[in-house]
């Protein structure tokens, strides 16, 4: 006699399973508690109504729901198709998106359209800034005595991602995305450094070392801790080598950010063109900051 072991999932069985997931430590649940996604709604709704967004068809799905799904895509390094499958399959992902067991979320094409709308409206940087305001209001400000400097570095994903990192909290404060052919150094003076930061020291790799940058930093009241290059045709002096080693110990923090994006988040460039590359990297930086805020809030309350 064949026995059908499958039973329909009722409300209480789903709730019990979610409770078990919470008890085992659901990172999406803690992320949802750390980040108020509703604060992004005004920016998302303005973007969704921008000229050129798609009209007609089925009623538009909630913009915050779609934004949450894009965060999941960045967090786990998924394609849009894979993200759609995972939301249908995982109860923790459904809960993060605010979906019930019988609800239907946006498909891959809908998310692709929404992502393109955000790019067209230039909304992603505004979303990143809004997240920074939330982080600051939570008490995690970029402040410094000598021990709280900023830091910048570049990973290369075909295009280049330049970021400015708040060393105290590990928050990405500024970003610039360029094509790989551009010279790196000049971008230090193009909004990458947050001059209002109470930190006065700036760490960076040798690509940012130039007379123009040194003069600009001095004019801003900032102290350059930029690595020095090896003299051409001569060995590096012990004094410079020792100073670079000291700077590298500070700059190691930046490797944690890029390591998280490449290894944990699986950041890859599936797009063509600088605008889409900028959008992908901006979403990765935003998601990284969300994860960092979650970690900061899990520790002691900010001073």
Image (cartoon, grey):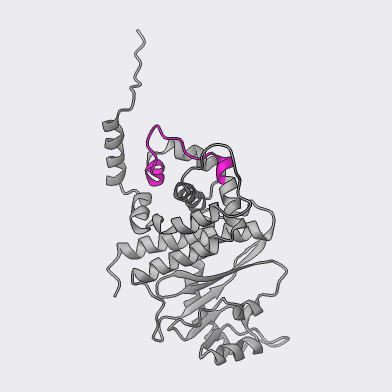
At x 36%, y 53%, the residue is: 32
Quadrant where the C terminus is found in the figure:
bottom left
At x 38%, y 63%, the residue is: 293
Where residue 87 appears, as percent x and y from the top left, is 45, 40
Q: Nearer the viewer, residue 45 or 124?
A: 45
Can residue 79 be seen at all in this image of the molecule? no
Q: Is residue 59 above or below residue 75?
A: above
Q: Is residue 20 above or below residue 34?
A: above
What's the magenta region?
92-111
At x 66%, y 79%, the residue is: 186
Residue 4 in the figure: left or right of residue 196: left
Quadrant where the N terminus is found in the figure:
top left
Whether residue 101 is in magenta: the answer is yes
Can residue 297 be seen at all in this image of the molecule? yes
Where residue 155 appears, as percent x and y from the top left, is 60, 66
Q: Nearer the viewer, residue 134 or 282?
A: 134
């Amino acid at each position: 006699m064949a026995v059908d072991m499958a039973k329909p999932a009722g409300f209480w069985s789903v709730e019990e399973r979610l409770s078990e997931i919470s008890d085992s430590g659901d990172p999406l649940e803690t992320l949802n508690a750390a980040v108020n996604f509703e604060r992004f709604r005004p920016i998302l709704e303005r973007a969704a109504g921008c000229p050129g967004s798609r009209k007609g068809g089925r009623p538009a799905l909630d913009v915050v729901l779609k934004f949450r799904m894009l965060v999941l895509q960045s967090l786990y390094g998924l394609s849009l198709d894979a993200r759609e499958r995972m939301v249908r399959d995982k109860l923790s992902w459904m809960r993060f998106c605010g979906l019930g067991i019988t609800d239907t979320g946006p498909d891959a094409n809908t998310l692709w359209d929404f992502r393109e709308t955000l790019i067209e409206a230039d909304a992603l940087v505004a979303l990143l800034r809004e997240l920074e305001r939330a982080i600051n209001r939570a008490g995690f400000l970029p402040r410094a005595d000598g021990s709280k400097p900023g830091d910048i570095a570049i990973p290369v994903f075909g295009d280049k991602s330049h970021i400015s990192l708040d060393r105290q909290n590990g928050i990405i404060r500024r970003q610039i995305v360029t094509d790989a052919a551009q010279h790196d150094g000049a971008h230090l003076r193009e909004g990458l450094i947050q001059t209002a930061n109470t930190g006065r020291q700036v760490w960076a790799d040798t690509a940012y070392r130039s007379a123009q940058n040194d003069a600009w930093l001095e004019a801003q009241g900032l102290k350059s801790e930029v690595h020095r290059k090896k003299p051409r045709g001569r060995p590096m002096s012990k004094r410079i080598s020792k100073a670079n080693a000291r700077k590298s110990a500070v700059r190691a923090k930046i490797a944690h950010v890029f390591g998280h994006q490449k290894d944990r988040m699986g950041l890859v460039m599936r797009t063509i063109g600088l605008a889409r590359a900028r959008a992908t990297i901006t979403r990765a930086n935003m998601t990284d900051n969300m994860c960092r805020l979650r970690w900061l809030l899990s520790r002691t309350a900010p001073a």
